[in-house]
Amino acid sequence: MFLQRSAVAVARRAAVSPLVRRTLTTTAVRRDAVQDASAQSAKIKTFSEIKSSTDLVGPGAKPGTVPTDIEQSTGLERLEILGKMESVDIFDMRPLDSSRKGTMENPIPVRSAGDEQYAGCTGVPADSHVVTWLGMSRERPIERCPECGSVYKMEYVGPTDDGHGHHDHHGFEEPKTFANFVKPQYW
Ligand SMILES: [Zn+2]
């Protein structure tokens, strides 16, 4: 009986030991990777050191290793990651203010770095109605939710020298809406 039991114990140990060894090996590799990353971090430009798009190229991974995001990402993705590492949310992913209903006098601001911006309204408080998507543009920045009446206004925060200022648009005229036919005294 004793012999049998020890045989089982030996078998169990044999079955378990490769797993244990592998876990330790993996841990050792991971620790190496962390050390490599800290050694490389001297070469990685931080968020405040980024001056142009040419700075947004990572050093790449060492041969034979799997690259991490910080090693291989480029462009806006890299800028976003570098910003997150310093708690800077470069794309401003916070939800819109839903603590109050926007009015024409005091609309809910929607910041946009582009010519157009879509915003989803779910009412006040948030999730009071199904999401209603509202489109705003630099030409027509104010939009009102048809479900709850909350007013939103796009605030352009993008570059000012993007060639948008000439307002010619090669003869294109924006389509008219009901807002174009409201009598002035009703505004
Ligand atoms: Zn709404």
Image: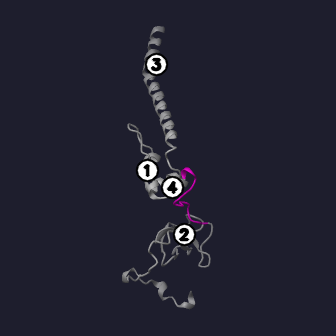
Tell us which disc is closer to us: 3 or 1: 1
Mark 2 closeness class: few <14, some 14–19, many ≥20 residues within 10 Å:
many
Q: Position of residue 151 (x, y in %)?
A: 56, 75
* Amino acid at circle 4: Ile
Inter-mark Cα distance, 1 to 4: 14 Å
Residue situated in front as seen by the camera: 110 or 86: 86
Looking at the image, tell me whether mark 2 or mark 1 is earlier in sequence order: 1
Tell us which disc is closer to us: 3 or 2: 2
Tell us which disc is closer to us: 3 or 4: 4
Residue indicated by mark 1:
73
Residue indicated by mark 4:
50
Residue indicated by mark 2:
110
Looking at the image, tell me whether mark 2 or mark 4 is earlier in sequence order: 4
Q: Is residue 166 magenta?
A: no
* Amino acid at circle 2: Val
First to last magenta residue range: 84-98
Q: Are the two marked residues, 3 and 4, in contact with CB atoms closer than 8 angstroms? A: no
Looking at the image, tell me whether mark 3 or mark 1 is earlier in sequence order: 3
Q: How many marks?
A: 4
Tell me if residue 87 comes above or below residue 139 in the rendering. above
Q: Position of residue 181 (x, y in %)?
A: 48, 88
Residue at (44% x, 27% y) in the render: 22
Quarter of the figure with the C terminus? bottom right
